[in-house]
Image (cartoon, rainbow, N blue to C red):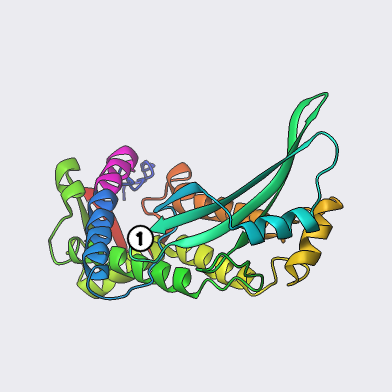
Amino acid sequence: MDTTPQMPQYATLPSRHFWRRAVAYLIDIIIFQAAILIAVYCISTVLPLDFRFPGWSYTQCGVELPDQLAKRIDAGWPLRSGEVRINQICEVSQIGSEKQRYLQTGVSRQTDNGTSGQWLTIPVDADDNPVIGPVFVNSSVISGIVNIAFLAFAFAYFSANGRRTIGKKLLGLRVQSVDGKSPGLGTDFRREILKFSPYLFFIAAAFAFSLFPVFPTEDFDALLRMSRDGYTLLNNGAATFNIILGIAALIWWFLPFIFWRGQTFYDRICACKVVKS
C-alpha cells in the first residue's frame, strides 16, 4: 500500500476576462441602444409615443416669458436691493416623446464670496401656466422597463444557442453553461435580466419617490412668497437612496471580479460562464 503523501489538487479557476468582457459589453450596448433609439424615433414619427429614456434628452432655455406670468413672478417674489431677476422657459426634448416645458425663475446677487443665486423650477403647460402637483413618472418607468427588456432580449438572443454578439466576436468570448454547452434563449434571457437588474431597481426607486409631493404647496403665488423668504427645495432622500443603489450595483457587477470564484453572481445563478472561444 502506497503511503506516500499526495499533493493537494487545486481546481483551476477560469480567467476573469475582465477587460475583454468590459470592452465587448461597451460595443454591444452602443449597438443595441442605438438600434432601439432609432426604432423608437422612426415609430414616433408615425404613432404618438410617450417614451422617455433617461439621459437621452436635449435642453434648450431662453424662451421669453409671457408678460402676465412675468408680472405675477415680480409681484410674488419682489427683488431686494442688489438682486437681479432671471426668468426663462426651458424645453426638454427626448426621443419618442413630446417636449417638456419648465419655468426657471430666480434671483442672483453679488456677495463677498462671489455670485450667489436662488432658483425655482416648475413645469408649465402649453399656455405657459405653472403646473404644481405630483410629478408622475409613469412614462419614464414604462420606457425604462421596455428599454431594459429589449436590451436584455438582444443580448440574450445573440448569446444563446451558440451565437455571439458582435462585441463578444471581436473580443473572442462566448457564453457557456457550466457543463460546456450553449445555453438556450430562456436561460440567457434570465441571465441578462439579472445582469441589468440594478437598472430596474433605479427605475422602481424613481417611481416610488415620484409618489411624494415635490413642493410643500400647490399654490404658485404662495411658492413664490416662500422662495422670496429663502425657501429652497429640500432633498426628499432620492439622491441618498440613489447613491446607496449605485454602491449596491457596483458590488453586484464588480465584487465577483475582485474576489474571483470563476463566475459573476448572475452567471452563478444561471449556471453559466464566459469563456474565451
Give how far across and how far down residue 179 sits, in percent: 23, 63
Give how far across and how far down residue 176 sits, in percent: 22, 59
Q: Residue at x 40, y 61 (%)?
A: 53
Tell me: residue 53, above or below residue 6: below
Q: Is residue 200 left or right of residue 133?
A: left
Does the stretch in magenta take in 75?
Answer: no
- Relative depth, front residue between 192 and 259: 192
Tell me: residue 61, above or below residue 236: above
Q: Which residues are magenta?
A: 16-27
Does the stretch in magenta take in 18?
Answer: yes
Tell me: residue 145, above or below residue 275: below
Is residue 177 visible in the rendered image? The answer is no
Q: Residue at x 70, y 47 (%)?
A: 106
Residue 15: which quarter of the image? top left
Identify the residue position indicated by label 1 in the image: 267
Q: Is residue 59 left or right of residue 64?
A: left
Give how far across and how far down residue 115 sits, in percent: 73, 30
Q: Residue at x 33, y 73 (%)?
A: 49
Q: The disc labelled 1 sits on which kind of residue?
A: Asp
- Relative depth, front residue between 78 and 93: 78
Give how far across and how far down residue 58 sits, in percent: 42, 50
Residue 147: which quarter of the image? bottom left
Q: Give the class, few, some or many, for how many residues have Cα within 10 Å of label 1's Cα (few <14, many ≥20).
A: many
Q: Farthest residue in the front direction?
A: 67
Q: Residue at x 27, y 40 (%)?
A: 20
Give the structural element (helix, strand or loop) at label 1. helix
For the image, the number of numbered tags is 1
SS assignment for the magenta stretch, majority: helix
Is residue 142 visible in the rendered image? The answer is yes
